[in-house]
Every structure is written in structure tokens, then in C-alpha cells.
Amino acid sequence: MLGRAANGVYWMSRYLERAENTARLIDVGFHLALTRGNKHSQDEEWKSVLTTTGLLEDYCARHADITGPQVFNYLLRDRDNPGSVLGMLENARTNARMVRNSLTNAVWETTNEGWMHLSELLSRPVRETNLGEVLGQVRRTGTLVRGALEGTMLRNEVFNFSRIGTFIERADSTARILDVKYYVLLPSAAWVGSSLDNVQWDTLLRSVAGNRAYSWLNAGAMDPRGIARFLILDGQFPRSLVFCYEKIRSNMAGLAKEYGEETGAHEILRATGTGLHQTTIEDIFEMGLHEFLQDFIGKTQHLGNAIAADYRFIE
Amino acid sequence: MTAAGRTNYDEMLNEDGSVRPAYADFRNWYDSQDKAWLKRQDAEAERFFRRIGITFNVYGDDAAEERLIPFDMIPRIVTAREWRKLTQGIEQRVRAINAFLQDLYHRQEIIRSGRLPVHALRNNEAFLAQMIGMTPPGGVYTHIVGIDLVRTGPDEFMVLEDNARTPSGVSYMLENRETMMAMFPELFTKIPVRPVSDYPRRLARSLRACAPPAFKGSGRPTVAVLTPGIYNSAYFEHAFLADQMGAELVEGSDLRVVDGRVAMRTTTGYKAIDVIYRRVDDDYLDPLSFNPDSVLGVAGIMDVYRAGGITIANAPGTGIADDKAIYSYMPEIVEFYTGEKPILSNVPTWRCSEPDALAYVLDNLAELVVKEVHGSGGYGMLIGPTSSKKELADFEAKLRARPDNYIAQPTLSLSTVPIFSKEGLAPRHVDLRPFVLVSPEGIDITPGGLTRVALKKGSLVVNSSQGGGTKDSWVLDE
């Protein structure tokens, strides 16, 4: 396939995943606003949502204060925001349109319809009353496109590039969410087991759609180390770092098989992936959670760049 | 421009209101349908088009970046007998166009013989000096031609325009048929309509038959469709055709010259292309030979072309054959190269470069249609009968300043075909663009084509960029 088409499929999937992750962060911010009366901690939560998406600086350059509706409208539909959900869906759809011939009709149509529906919903300011509907539609679009890919695409290079895009984005996203909140998982004499801790841990798990799965596995008991282990090392949880890397490994293996050779990106992947598999949560806390995550984010970015170069995404 | 007060030919109804044979079966079916149901189907068609993304982009219209070409669900129907005569005329004309191009870029016999004045060629930007002495692979210049026809009477089809560069619209021919078959399957069991769906297969075969000398493989020649990209108004069509042909859809940035071949950048390295169906204009094809600022083309492709490393479809420089200044000479051109009288006639045309013609045009401006010689898409033209005094005066000034930039034609009384309107069937003016494929194996005309329809009552402008719509076009089987 064309290098440009591989690039298009990869970024289509990354943008869809990113739109969905941003929607989930907004959902958590909103949920918190409903459950915590304290204005200061609400603002803090919206601020951390902006930090996680990397848009805090841009937001502050445009707005004097942080209020819920202002933040979620900025994140969802602000034309000047380069990372808005609407902008990302448009990017996903533009990429899909560019590589339309590599996609099945089902994949193209679900992407196109999702974009059509959301650009209609987002053509007017979003209020608290219809925020849930909008966020639900973003999630549904991601789910439908992934389902269409899974159900209709040949398991060839196109499929592999798409999946690699999804899981690189997801690994990056989970790591960033954790990194912005890493301090809540650090041992702290004053707060251990307090109800504020519980709320913060729950918020963190919700940000990656892991609150129910975690409770399930741990019979409702919360502890910071267990949460960190779950989000980083649990191979069953589909947003954990280990899970994402396992998926990238399998799709990269698919490419090597189809093309008859490995590339430099395979070696980088092997090095990072093996390190991740062999590490324990104790090692991670010893190294420092923040340092570990920073290192992971850098390596994932490096891997993404190597894939783009090795498969000639651009000239 | 309106044809009010004129008697134009209606393709469905005789003058006494009875139904012509071509539409008899269709009318029977239509009359027995529930009109409310038909209205729902009509609305359904639009949703269908939008979901699958058949849109076109309008230049200079930011708000509605992607628009649908309105689709009218009443088919335009041509009988087997009418079609037979049409195809003979089209084949003759396309054969002549290719012979004309071969001659213009070589010995120029037609000019030596005095049948075409040399000034028609001189200072004509559509004539490409880079093509002089060059014979394309297989001797084919125009692999794909769209001939725009208008009808003025029972047996009178005229050629309004020859599209010999990169005619578009064929995807609408195909999608309109798909839509009709999905909406009204039983119609096709009742009425013998000749299929159009194998056009992409025929196109692929036709293009592969023109492989360049450098192709020596035992397999099939590699075909790619070159598009300017997703913001081009016809991008949907480019993607659609590539997909249906099983060809790669490439952009200029995917291509470069490698080892004397034009090659595309794949995930595993550069791979040579044999035939490129380019949907970018000559001017953008090669920054080394033409417009140096172009990023849509491939640097060096013309050198590869001259060395026999690639087939470019259509060949560069074919625009000289559909140039409006040349158009008026087409009857002479057909006769010169085929030795026969033209089967299809031209629309009478005044060349404003000629003083007598200019004087006539200026005197009769309000009755005429005046077109820019190099314009297209219905832009830059004057439709006398519907223009205001001020518009006429403004245009007259332009005409006097640069008479050689214009031609003029009478306001034709175009035939009408019914559309589905709120008030039921209503006649509207139409044209027809059949699609013609040329290869060393012969000339292949798909039975049907694109019918464009002026949806506004009385309007004669059918261009999609100016509010026109399209219809499914049926050629009945014998």
C-alpha cells in the first residue's frame, strides 16, 4: 500500500481514539463537578483535564477563568482549539476520506456518519443538559468504527496500521492521564485512606474507563499501588500500558509477516515491550512513578516516529 | 436564458400530450405508483448519497464545502435506434479528434491544406510545444472523452462541447444507476435497460491496453489514478474509479522518478507505475516542464513519458482539440480526417475574432450565448436573453476589449425531460454526456452517460456548479 495511505489509516485511528479519550476526560470532570460542591476542587479537576490533553496553556491564553461549561465547550467544539473533539473527528474523517479505497464501506460510512452526527450536535454551544448525549455520541462513534474494522476488514497491512495507531494513542493517553495524577497514588501519611483519596482514585480509574473493572477484580478495595499496577501492568485491562504494547506487538508482527521482514521499529518495540513485561510495580515505584511514565511516553513517541519513517508515511 | 415562448422538443410527450414510445413503459409504471411513497423515496435518495459521501466541492464556497449534486429520480430515456445513430456520430468524431491531435503535433497537414487557419493554433495555450513530435503509446491521445450533446428535435442531436482533457462525471452515471436500482428494482425487471456498471472494468482494460514500451512484465500493467487530493471538486470520483478499477489512488507527493520510471512510494519502497490516469491539468503535471510552482504533479514525468517509461491518460496537450476556438472548425476537422460528412452537427458558432462575426454578435448580444474561449463550468459566460441591460453593457465592453477571447452561439431550444417536482412531472432542459474510451483495441462507448438537468423552470444552465442536477440515463435494449 502507499506510504501516505498507511499514514492516513494510522492517523484516522489515532484521532478517533484521542477524541474518545478526551470525551471521557470531560465526562469525569463533569461527574466530579456534580459530586463535589467545592468550587476550588472542581476548578482543579477541570485544570487537570486541560493539562492531560496538553491544552492548558492554549486555553489560558484565550480565557481568563476556568468554569465547567467554558472548558467543555472549548474542548469539544472551539474552532480555535487545535485539539478539540470536533477537530479531531474532522481529522479522522479527512484521513478516512483520503484513504477511502483502503477501507471497507462499513468503516468509511460509520466514520462519516459519526462525523456528520457530531458536527450537527456540536454546531451549537453544548449545555450541561445535553453534554451526556454529546459525549455518548463520541464514544459510540469510536465503538462503531472499531466494530466495523473488526467485523469487515481484511487482516492485512491496512488493518495492522489502523490498530497500531489506536494502541499507540491509547498507551500514550493512559500514561499521560496517570502522569498528571501520579501524585494521588504516592504514599502520603496525612491522607491515606481518607475519603478524598477514594474520590481521587475513583476519578483516575474513571478517566480510563477502569473503575468498574478495578472494583470487580479487587472486590471494591482501593489501594494506590494496586491501582497503578492495574493501569500499567494488567494484561487483561484493555487500556493498560502492557495491554496496548501487546497489541502493538501483535500488529507489528503481522506487518513483518506480510512484508517478509522486520524494521528498526520492531527492534525499538521489542526493547520497550520487554522492559515493560519484566518490570514490577515495586520497580516502578522505586524508580519513581513520574520518571517511569515520562520515560514511557518518550519511548512510545520514539516508536511512533520509527514506524512512520520505516514504512514511509511521508517523503 | 429561458426558452419560454419557443417550442422545444419534449422527450417524453408528443405535441398532442400523448407519450412517446421511449417513455411508454416508464409512464405506465409511474402512473400506477403511490405519489406519497415516491416522495419518501426521493428524500431517501439524498440521505443515501450523503451517507456514502458522494459530494462535490464548490470553489469559492467555504460554508458549504461539500455539496451534493441534486439527483432527480425520473430517468432520461433514449431508444435503441436513437442510440445507434448517436454512437456512430460519436465514434466518428472521437476518431477524428485523435487523428487531428496526431496531425497537429506532427506534420500539421490540416494547416498546410488551408482547412484550419494557423492563427487558431498560434498563441493558443492549449497547444503544448512539449508534445511536438511525440507519439503517445499505442498512438492514443484521448483515452477518455466526454462528448456533451444537446437535443433540439426528434433526430437532432448536436455537439455542444468535446471534453478531451479530463472529463468528469462518470461516477454520477454509475451511482445514479445504482441508486435507481436500489430504489426501484422492479422497474429494471419490467424495462430492458442496458447496463453501465462495467464502465470501470472497461476503463481499466482500455488503459492497460495502452501500456508504454517500458512495460515488459508478464503480469498486468500497473495503473494508478492521479488526483489533486481530497479538496478537489471531483475527488469522490477519483477515489471511486480507482477503487472500482483496483488501481492505486495517488497524489503528486506519492510519486517521483526512480530509475527512469515514475514510481509510487509504498510502505515497502518505490514501485513503478505503467499507466497513469491523471486527473490534474496539463499545467500542473510536471513542474519541470510546465508550471514550476505545481505540487500536484511529478517532477520529470514528461522526460519519462518521452522516453516511453509511462503512459499518461489523457495525453498532455489534448486540450487543443476541445478548445472553444477550435470547436467551430470541428465539421471541417471530421471531414478532413474521416473523408465523411459529420454525422453529428455542431452548434452554429460565431468566432468573435472575425470582424464580421463580431459585428453580428454585438448587434444581437441580447439573443446570444457568449462563452470564453478557455472557460469551463459555466463560468464567465453571458446568456443574452436572461441578462440585464447593465450585464449586457458590461459584457459588451469585455467583448470589445478582447474579441478573440470569445465565441457566440444562438440560444438553443434544448429538449426537455420530466423531473419529479412537488406538482408531479414537470419538463426541464437537459444535456447528455456519454463517456467514450479509446484504446488500440478500438472505441468503446458506454450505453448511457450523464444527463445533466437544469432544475429551475425554464433555465438552460445544467452545470452542477450553477444549480443543475443529474438523472439516470437509460438506453433501451433492442
Image (spheres, coloured by chain):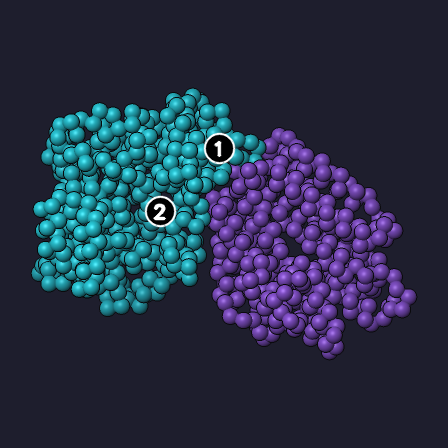
Chain colours: A purple, B cyan
Q: Residue furthest toward the right?
A: A189
Residue furthest to the bottom in view is: A37
Q: Amino acid at mark 1?
A: Arg
Q: Is residue A166 above or below residue A250?
A: below
Depth check, front residue: B111 or A144:
B111
Residue B220 % position (x, y): 42, 28
Give left or right: position of B83 versus B236: left
> Where does the image place residue B32, in percent across and percent down from the top left?
24, 62
Dot 2: few (<14), some (14–19), or many (≥20) neighbours within 10 Å?
Answer: many
Q: Residue at x 16, y 60 (%)?
A: B385
Taking the spot 10% from the left edge, 55% from the top edge, the residue there is: B363
Q: Which residue is mark 1?
A: B256
The chain identifier of the residue carrying mark 1 reads B
Residue B470 percent across, percent down from the top left? 29, 54
Image quadrant for the N terminus of chain B? bottom left
What secondary structure is marked by label 2?
A: helix
Q: What is the secondary structure assignment of the residue under circle 1?
A: strand
CB atoms of marks 2 and 1 within 8 Å = no
Asked if one can make out residue B14 in the rendered structure from this viewpoint, the answer is: no
Q: Which residue is mark 2?
A: B171
Tell me residue A20's x, y (percent).
62, 59
Upstream in sequence: badge 2 or badge 1: 2
Image point (80%, 50%), residue name: A292
Residue A203 lies in quadrant: bottom right
Above-or-below relation of A158 to A30? above
- Say if residue A94 shows up in the picture: yes
Q: Nearer the viewer, residue A304 or B293?
A: B293
Q: Amino acid at mark 2?
A: Ser
Chain ID, mark 2:
B
